[in-house]
Image (tube, grey):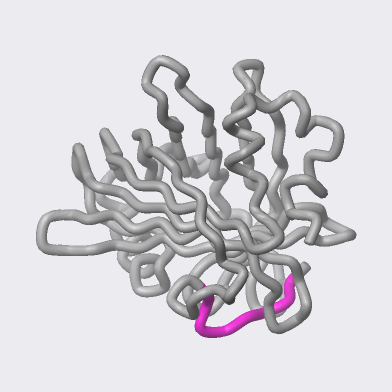
Amino acid sequence: MTGVFERTLGADLANLHPRMRERLALSDGRGMIGHGVMDRIWRGPGFTLPFLWLGSAWHVLFPERGRNVPFTIENYPYVDGYGRETVSFVRTFEFPGRRRRFDAQMVHSTGRGLVDYLGTHQHLAVDLAVSVRPDGGFRIRSGEFRFREGMGLPRALTVTATVDEWFDDDLGQFRIEVAVVHPRFGPVFGYEGSFAARYVDVGGGVSGAVKPLREKVMD
């Protein structure tokens, strides 16, 4: 496998911080597990709660807020049931008395570039634009959302998600900031913190625990 990020970034891959290049080299049986702490997890005003509660049932967003929340991210490369090269992005947040997950699988589409499939049943697909930051980190910004076999979401329900990740040389860890914002109503959900990475051999296969219960094609 070439790797979905190598295919997406192309020559720009060389502009990443060396630790970021290592972080994204997720192919040929090599995965990554990150353990850390989210300094802050936040959500928007009360009217966002129904949306966030619905998302939590599908492992997409959640309504809890907190500080110093233990965090795990699991990135494993595999080939899905449609023959697509895929990387899991399974994030687990350990709140007091409750565990929350935010699941996604990234694939590279010839026509669309990098596409993120969200949720336990890949309920949503979203096009992603990836760029390299001046500090050698990366920024991912969401584009069009689709559901129900490729139908676009109504504009009133569409949000923009931005993910910034970089390596902090002083801290010796990866830093991450995520913000989900509605163009009219403002901030909806986000988190920020840091994690350390270790790399694992997944040549023997990837556990079904980090795969969706149903796979779909909307790219």
Residue extending furthest toward the left: 97
Q: Is residue 173 above or below residue 27?
A: above
Residue 207 appears at what percent x and percent y?
A: 49, 76
Rendered residue at 71%/61% (across/down) = 28
Q: Is residue 44 visible?
A: no
Rendered residue at 84%/39% (across/down): 10
User: Quadrant of the image for the N terminus?
Assistant: bottom right
Number of numbered discs overlaid on the protein picture: 0
User: In the image, what residue occupies the spot 57% across and 53% down?
Assistant: 158
Q: Of residues 174 and 128, which is closer to you in this image?
A: 174
Q: Is residue 177 above or below residue 34?
A: above
Depth check: give the residue in front, 7 or 216: 7
What percent of the width, then of the height, locates residue 182?
50, 44
Q: Position of residue 19 (x, y in %)?
A: 58, 31
Q: Quadrant of residue 205?
A: bottom right
Q: Is residue 185 left or right of residue 25?
A: left
Occupied quadrant, residue 44:
top left
Give the residues in magenta.
211-218
Does the magenta stretch mainly form a helix, a strand or a loop? loop
> Considering depth in this image, is 8 or 78 the residue closer to the camera?
78
**What is the quadrant of the C terminus in the image?**
bottom right
| Left/right of residue 95 with respect to residue 84 in the rendered view | left
Lateral position of residue 19 relative to residue 6, left or right: left
Q: Is residue 21 magenta?
A: no
Q: Is any part of residue 164 visible from this angle?
A: yes
Determine whether 158 is above or below 76 in the image. Answer: above
Give the percent coordinates (x, y) of residue 14: 77, 28
Residue at 74% across / 72% down in the picture?
218
Magenta stretch contains residue 212: yes
Instruction: State whether residue 19 is above or below residue 64.
Output: above
